[in-house]
Image: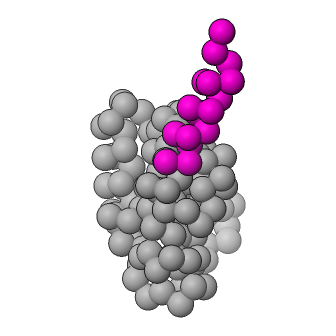
Amino acid sequence: KYDTSEKGQKRYKKYVESERGEITRRVISVNYNSKKRGRSEKITTDDLSSILEANKKLLGFLSCSYCSINVEETYEIDHDIPLSKEGSNEPTNLIVSCAECNNKKHTLTAAEFREKRKKQLILTTETHTI
C-alpha cells in the first residue's frame, strides 16, 4: 500500500529525483523493453550502477560510448548488439550513449555504428580540406 500522505509524497518525490531512483527508473525501462521483445533476462540496479561507474572511469565523467560527450543528465542505456539482432539484456551487452547517437544507431551493432561514424568523419574531413 502506498503512503499517500503529504509526507509520503515528499519522500517518494525525493527518492525519484535521487540517483538511486533514476537508476531504478532506467532499469525498469530496460527490462520492460526487453520483455516486450520476448526476452526473459533482466538487469538489476546493481548491474546498471556498475555499468555507469565503469563508464565514468574512462573520462572522469559519464560519457557517450560513441561520441564521448558528457551525458551526466541525459544518458540512455543502449545495447551493444540490439535486441532486434538477438542481443541480450546481459550487463556486458549494455553501454551508455547520448540520445542522438542511440537514435542514429537504430538497429546497428555498436561496432557497425562506430564504423559508420568513422566513415562519415572521414568524408566530412575530406570535403573540408583546403
Q: Of helix, strand and loop, which mostly describes the magenta segment?
A: helix
Q: Which residues fall within the magenta stretch?
A: 115-130
Residue 118 covered by magenta stretch: yes
Quadrant, the N terminus? bottom right
Q: In the rendered image, which quarter is residue 89 located in? A: bottom left
Q: In this view of the protein, which residue sits in the foreground, 20 or 8?
A: 20
Q: Outermost residue toward the top?
A: 130
Q: Position of residue 39 (x, y in %)?
A: 48, 86
Query: Is 1 situated above or below 112?
Result: below
Query: Is 4 situated above or below 55?
Result: below
Q: In this view of the protein, which residue sits in the foreground, 77 or 66?
A: 66
Q: Position of residue 48 (x, y in %)?
A: 39, 60
Q: Position of residue 10 (x, y in %)?
A: 63, 55
Query: Is 69 situated above or below 43?
Result: above
Tell me what residue is drawn at x 53 percent, y 90 percent: 38
Q: In the rendered image, which quarter is residue 61 located in? A: top left
Tell me what residue is drawn at x 45 percent, y 67 percent: 81
Can the viewer see residue 71?
no
**Left or right, residue 129 beside residue 20:** right
Residue 92 covered by magenta stretch: no
Quadrant, the C terminus? top right
